[in-house]
Amino acid sequence: MTSAADSDARPYRDGVGVALLNADDMVFVGQRIDQTAEAWQMPQGGIDPGEDPLQAALREMEEEIGVPATLAEVIAESRGWLSYDLPRDLADKVWKGKYRGQRQKWYLARFKGRDSDINIQTAHPEFNQWRWLPFRQLPEMIVPFKRPIYELIVAEFADRVRT
């Protein structure tokens, strides 16, 4: 029997994400505002037409957590694109059912600001709370369908992070 994800012919949505580290090598995670269960994630989102992945990542970071590019130093980029499939029920609802999931380019960045520079009360809030988390704990905090991609992010950037 073929699973729904295996038989889904829809394309992946191009996206980006930022693993933002503080001075102690702890990574930013926000609790999604649209979830009742714990659903933590790093800033991430889609690429707008005409935008390159790095521009998109920095824009998403500012839109979601209020941190401008001037307060983040990009120190690494994922070697390739990392993909995840949405659960079938979500894939039929999210992004008007057009995509099966996302393929993402990820960036590791050093936060050069203070905690008070982070503002999740943005024009279109995505998070209702946030915290710094040891980098290697990321996969434990993520919704199950995104766990494999977060495991890949941790593996790829682990040699640059102490926590």
Image (cartoon, helix red, strand yellow):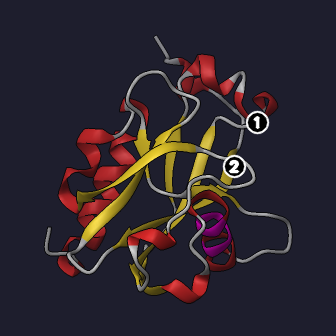
Residue drawn at (85%, 66%) of the image: 49
The residue tagged 1 is: 95
Under mark 2, the amino acid is Arg
- Residue at 51% in and 38% down: 32
Q: Is the residue under label 1 in contact with that under label 2 (CB below 8 Å)? A: yes
The residue beneath circle 2 is 13
Q: Main secondary structure of the magenta part?
A: helix
Question: As shown in the figure, which amino acid type bears the numbered disc 1?
Answer: Trp
Query: Which image quarter is the C terminus in?
Result: bottom left
Nearer-N-terminus badge (2/1): 2
Residue 61 percent coordinates (x, y): 58, 66
Q: Is residue 122 above or below residue 69?
A: above
> Does 149 appear in magenta?
no
The furthest residue to the front: 116
Q: Position of residue 12 (x, y in %)?
A: 66, 46
The single residue placed furthest to the right in the displayed view is: 49
In the image, 70 versus 41, the foreground residue is 70
Residue 152, x across and y down, in percent? 32, 57
Q: What's drawn in magenta, residue-wise?
A: 58-62
Left/right placement of residue 42 relative to residue 142 reads: right
Q: Quadrant of residue 127?
A: top right
